């Protein structure tokens, strides 16, 4: 069943690039969360997407939001990608594809290169109560999320 705005966000615990566990429960105890799923590290559109979030990090902080990005890449390749792009937020490895499936954000058959089990580009805003306030799941891996709508959803998080 697809993720719907208003529903409780599926909880997760994954490893970041420093080999530490990061859980949604812990994140929402401190701030709202922007959860980004991206197909593959080191690809053009994924780099554009995450660098856009990096370049706007101060805006997200002012909106009381923590950015987390998830892909099916290993935490080792994500670590190198994070270092090269100077990303100031955690990248989490969903190597086993469990969380991507929970968020309806997994291509069983990726439209390029004949790959299977690749993360769909998606954006979710999750408030401090764990509710989904914005959900965008893109079927076209060449598109990036509408970050203006992400920020608008964040502006409304603390009003409700």
Image (cartoon, grey):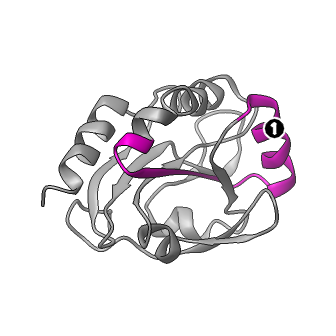
Report the residue at 47% width, 34% height from top. 58
Q: Is residue 5 visible?
A: yes
The quadrant of the image that shows the N terminus is: bottom left
Is 113 placed left or right of 49 in the picture? right
Residue 83 x/y as whole percent: 81, 38
The magenta span reads: 61-86
- Density class for disc 1 (Cα within 10 Å; few <14, some 14-19, many ≥20) is few
Q: Does the magenta-highlighted stretch encompass residue 74?
A: yes
Residue 158, image quadrant: bottom left
Residue 48 x/y as whole percent: 59, 24
Residue 84 x/y as whole percent: 81, 31
Q: Which residue is mark 1?
A: 83
Q: Is residue 138 visible?
A: no
Looking at the image, residue 134 lies above or below residue 27? above
Q: Residue furthest left?
A: 160
Residue 62 x/y as whole percent: 37, 41
């Amino acid at each position: 069943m697809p993720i719907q705005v208003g529903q409780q966000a599926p909880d997760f615990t994954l490893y970041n690039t420093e080999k530490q566990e990061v859980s949604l429960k812990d994140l929402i105890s401190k701030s709202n969360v922007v959860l980004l799923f991206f197909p593959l590290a080191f690809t053009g559109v994924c780099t554009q997407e995450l660098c856009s979030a990096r370049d706007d990090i101060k805006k997200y902080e002012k909106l009381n939001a923590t950015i987390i990005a998830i892909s099916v890449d290993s935490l080792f390749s994500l670590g190198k990608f994070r270092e090269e792009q100077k990303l100031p937020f955690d990248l989490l490895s969903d190597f086993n594809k469990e969380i991507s499936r929970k968020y309806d954000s997994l291509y069983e058959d990726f439209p390029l290169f004949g790959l299977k089990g690749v993360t769909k580009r998606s954006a979710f805003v999750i408030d401090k109560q764990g509710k989904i306030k914005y959900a965008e799941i893109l079927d076209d891996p060449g598109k990036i999320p509408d970050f203006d709508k992400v920020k608008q959803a964040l502006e409304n998080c603390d009003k409700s």
